[in-house]
Image (spheres, rainbow, N blue to C red):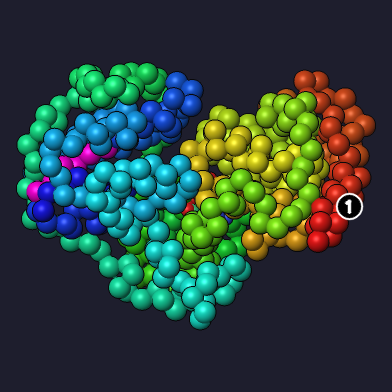
Amino acid sequence: MRRILWFRRDLRIEDNPLLSLDGEVLPIFIFDTNILDKLTKQDKRVSFIFGYVSKLKQDLLACGLELKIFFGSPKDVFASLTSHKMDEVVACGDYDSYAKQRDLEISQKLHFRYIKDTYIFKPDEVLKEDKTPYLVFTPYYKKARLLLESKNIEATSQAEQKLIPVEYEGITKIDANGVSTKLPFSLESLGFEMQKLKIIHPHAKLEKFKQNIQNYKQMRDFLNEDVGSNLSVDLRFGTISTRAVLRSVLSLKNLECEPFIRQLIFRDFYAYLLFHMPRLETQNYKPSFNGIEDREKYEFFCKAQTGVPIVDAGVRELLQTGKMHNRVRMVTASFFTKDLLLPWQWGEEFFAEHLLDFDKASNVLSWQWSAGTGVDPQPYFRVFNPYLQSKKFDKDANYIKKYIPELTHVESKYLHDENYLLGATIQGYPKPMVHHKEAAKIAVEKFKHGVEGLR
Ligand SMILES: Cc1cc2nc3c(=O)[nH]c(=O)nc-3n(C[C@H](O)[C@H](O)[C@H](O)COP(=O)(O)OP(=O)(O)OC[C@H]3O[C@@H](n4cnc5c(N)ncnc54)[C@H](O)[C@@H]3O)c2cc1C
């Protein structure tokens, strides 16, 4: 059997099922121009991926294998490989609409096989008795937890593989006419600039997280406590296997691990919903209020100039680091869709452009949850009060002041006080652009009408 092993969301050799397939292999990675062409040259994710692709190449070499790296559209790359007479291409499943269409096109030319890797379960493994998908998380979680036997998280072992001899050096650029050009192996060859990123090995993150796991449930929402695993970017690009994370945490045999396992299952649930209902990528699950397209408000949000400290701090954290604390993601998404009444799709796109851990399923479904428009959303009448949220989770305003230096001289308690912020003049920082209580009242009416008026 001659196989192309297509590395995508699994940039590692440890516990990688692609390496458990025997026979002749051609391991490849594609820097996909359909995706890269839309990004800025300073995109942090491309630097992250480039670093891990380099590591993957080194690690494969150490096992007697190699990695052929392409730059082009996957369709053109696969067309260029036809002369190698391959039997199949194998890759881990990827469920957003672009990925599905891309794989479908390739499967029309070469036998395509998905293997389970990115998620704990395949989309058809956790179904209701009547074989339809769950739409509510808690029953999904209960069923998934029952199924989470060791067989789902066993480590894969490395098979005997024989490397197909081709030219592995540099980067092979394939253009739309099928013309192949050899480029030096560098990020600049792809037209990107290397960004400074603080990269911590995922196993080191996991070990640190496990030492503190008993605080995860209680402290996770506090903005100055670093008790989360910080593994989302690694799970996104597969620099650690989800199974390895689960094996490691479950081995603690500690009930306090459960809230974390629940989040990993949440990640699976969102990918599962997108797989079963692809239209959710852009559309509300049920008819609902669709937001109002207001470019001016949107620009204030994106420039972190809403005048609501916790929201602006979150946006600045995102722009500066590519990260945003989960609680702040919830507060900003609520503010965006409820206080500003902007369409959730715009917010989703903004996060997609900047999040290091951007994942279509988690991002879209989280935005729909916040807007109250998705499957199993929070009720539309529940609107986060950003001032109460910051008072509770950033009492001393350390997080706010870290990202908004213009506010360092303001007494912390005032940064959670809407009336103060509406009345005061703070040098270099705007007044809140909406009055929260009034905005929330309007939002509830709009969403109520959206839901009931369309029934
Ligand atoms: C509006 C909004 C957009 C989001 N967009 C993304 C996104 O694009 N990519 C992404 O990975 N997460 C997204 N999340 C979920 C969550 O904010 C991040 O996964 C989390 O902040 C990552 O930090 P961590 O690795 O320390 O997570 P931990 O708390 O340590 O959780 C462990 C893992 O579980 C998964 N996870 C945790 N919370 C969630 C959640 N609510 N939904 C789905 N999976 C979860 C992540 O893979 C995470 O690494 C979004 C949340 C919101 C509210």
Instruction: Please state which amino acid type lies under the numbered disc 1.
Output: Glu
User: Whole-percent x and y of residue 360?
Assistant: 51, 46
- Quarter of the rendering occupied by the C terminus: bottom right
Q: Nearer the viewer, residue 97 or 406?
A: 97
Q: Is residue 415 visible?
A: no
| Direction from residue 178 to residue 34 in the image, left or right | right
Find numbered disc 1 in the image and state the secondary structure of the residue it sits on. Answer: helix
| Direction from residue 176 to residue 393 in the image, left or right | right
User: Whole-percent x and y of residue 407?
Assistant: 74, 29
The residue drawn where x is 30% and y is 73% is: 151
Q: Which of 326 and 298 is in front in this view?
A: 298
25 drawn magenta: yes
| Direction from residue 171 to residue 266 in the image, left or right | right
213 drawn magenta: no
Is 342 drawn above or below residue 264 in the view shown?
A: above
User: Whole-percent x and y of residue 125?
Assistant: 41, 70
The residue drawn where x is 57% and y is 75% is: 139
Q: What stretch is highlighted in magenta?
A: 24-29
Is 185 drawn above or below residue 261 in the view shown?
A: above
User: For mark 1, what is the residue?
Assistant: 445
Is 435 drawn above or below residue 449 in the view shown?
A: above
